[in-house]
Amino acid sequence: MTDKAVIVAINSYPGAPLSGCLNDAQDAAEELVSAFGFKSAAIRLLVEKRATAKAILERLRWLARDAKPGDRLLFWYSGHGAQVADQNGDEVKGMDDVICPVDFNWEEPRLIRDDTFYEIFKTIPDGVHFAWVSDSCHSGTLTREFEPPAKKTSAKKAPKPKILGERFMPAPVDHAWSHRVARDLGHKPKPIAMSAPQINVAFISGCRDNQTSADANFGGRPNGALSYFLLKNLKAHKDAPVTALVDAVRADLKKNGYSQVPQIDGKRIGLPFLG
């Protein structure tokens, strides 16, 4: 059995910095060692200025290479997400979800599309215990405030969370216009895990397509809200099916006033996270 993990975290985006991603990475790596028995040498951390598109793709190909049943693989990403118009010449065909490497500039090759993830991960065979966490936003210009939904009952209101930022990358004017063209043409955003049902993976994303993921403060220490509550629940329920694990994460987020709703996809969601 081989264990491999790639953990990518970026705080220092030019013009759009985040706060909690490096803590997410450190916490996830420590959990792999302490709870799942990973050796430190099996974990590749790629952070800040080293987390370029080229470097991330190299690590992901290493992660998927020679995978065989019984192996345990993890890809954990904490950083900005965005949507870009998928263009064919001058014609907008639709929208692709992307993650934003540190050298992200809205153009190829300095972004990583959902299609690219599919091409790399589709080679991972059944029987491999593969989990993929994306603590990022899958929307570009679509944002919403993190306010608890109004309740008609007299139940105690959820506390207002301490939001440090939102994990989406705001589009420049030309790309924002392409987004508008795509929406006017009736093109709906394609989720980053659109092909995940065909992939041997348990995919966990930070929010719905029309939401942002929170960069938040927990006891004076920044973390992504998804990462914080996912790791909290992994400590207590690491052998639970991913469906139940994420239900617990959603409940914690709602209880603490976050409106983001994590999503799951892939063949492995009925199985334990890495078991």
Image: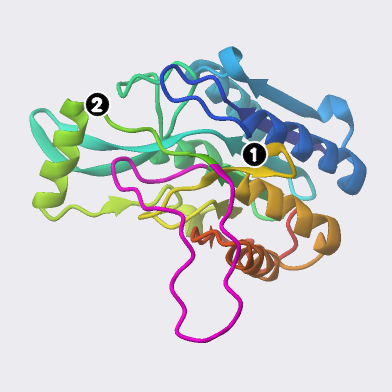
User: In whole angstroms, how far apart are the C-alphas of marks 1 and 2?
Assistant: 29 Å
Horizontal side of 27 relative to 92 (left or right) equals right
> The magenta stretch spans which residues?
136-163
* Residue 59 x %, y %: 62, 24
Q: Looking at this view, is 180 or 114 the one in front?
A: 180
Residue farthest along the top direction in this orientation = 49
Above/below status of 87 relative to 267: above
In which quarter of the view is residue 43 placed? top right
Residue bearing the label numbered 1: 75
Q: Looking at this view, is 221 or 113 the one in front?
A: 221
Work out whether mark 1 precedes mark 2 in sequence or the reverse, and give the earlier one: 1
Quadrant for the N terminus, please: top right
Quadrant for the C terminus, please: bottom right
Q: Looking at this view, is 127 or 253 the one in front?
A: 253
**Residue type pointed to by label 2:** Pro
Q: Residue at x 19, y 40 (%)?
A: 179
Q: Residue at x 41, y 46 (%)?
A: 138
Residue bearing the label numbered 2: 172
Q: Residue at x 65, y 55 (%)?
A: 126
**Residue type pointed to by label 1:** Phe
SS at circle 2: loop
Horizontal side of 261 relative to 221 (left or right) equals left
Residue 181 falls within the magenta-colored stretch: no
Give the colour scheme shown.
rainbow
In which quarter of the view is residue 44 placed? top right
